[in-house]
Amino acid sequence: MSVNTLLAGTVQLQPDLIRKSDDNVWTILRFSTLSSTNGFIHHHHHSLDDFTAVWALTQTKGRGRQRRVWRSIPNTDLTFSTIVPLLAQAPEYWPSVTLLVAVAVVEQLKELGFSPQIKWPNDIVINERKVAGILCESLMSNRNPRVIIGIGLNVNSPAESFTGLRSRATSLMVQGGSELALQDLLLNVLAQLHAGLKMWHQNRFKSIRHRVEEFLLRPEGRIQIRQSGQIVTGQMVGIDEFGYLMLKRSNGALERFTTGEMQLPKKQYR
């Protein structure tokens, strides 16, 4: 089904721009306003082709992991989602998609002169402050498993927009001192993402594991992982071949986590 047919009769959801990416891989739908880009793809995924990207200039009900609200300033930050195939990858590798996306974002920010790091499992930080978040949601199907990848990136938000959050959040403009073109950034991140997906589909997580380890934000000393209401304390060891976080307990036991909330000591990163 074409995009125009999909959206016929829903004037409030008509994109104001439909274009292909420069490499002709992605179909980009830009909307002036959506409640949630992930939510839009969830609602319409049966009619959307693989490698469709949905970009909202204004997102009114953006969300992150654990139903947290993702706040962004209209026409200032970058909020978009994509739908991509998981192909024949075994389900145990699916959690590593989030780290694949994180590497794509980090690679692009490094090209722009920033020094970003990946805070497991789904955040990008610069100078210890969050600049981007990732939300991946699988669409289960025996025939065609797919994943929705949502990315929220603080791009041109001024410092005053982080009142009360300055120790925890930032934007590329605050860190770099100048505004960035949202569409150019979107196209470049999508190009990095496609390159990463090709490697992931060919060689699973091992193709990018070394990049994750290189960019991983690591604390000195012990950390806490919150998962399902429980707190586990230990020393971060690294990322295993499936993309799981490895934590060494005080008794020497090694535990692996696919998700959770990592609490890091302040100003203890290396």
Image (tube, helix red, strand yellow):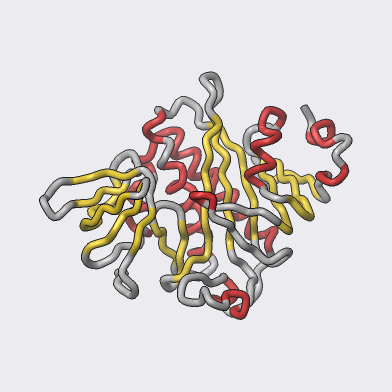
Left or right, 224 with respect to 47, comes to left
Counting the numbered discs, the total is 0
When the figure is inspected, residue 116 is found, relative to residue 240, above or below; the finding is below
- Percent across and percent down for residue 99 are 43, 48
- Percent across and percent down for residue 73 are 68, 66
Left or right, 26 with respect to 267, comes to right
* Residue at 29 percent of width and 72 percent of height: 268
In the foreground, 73 or 105: 73
Left or right, 99 with respect to 225, comes to right
Left or right, 85 with respect to 183, comes to left
- Percent across and percent down for residue 55 are 70, 51
- Percent across and percent down for residue 123 are 46, 58
* Residue at 54 percent of width and 50 percent of height: 67
* Residue at 73 percent of width and 58 percent of height: 57
In the foreground, 144 or 205: 144
Which residue is at the far left?
251
> Is the N terminus in the top left, top right, bottom left or bottom right quadrant?
top right
Q: Quadrant of residue 10?
A: top right
In the foreground, 161 or 3: 161
> Is the C terminus in the top left, top right, bottom left or bottom right quadrant?
bottom left
* Residue at 63 percent of width and 72 percent of height: 157
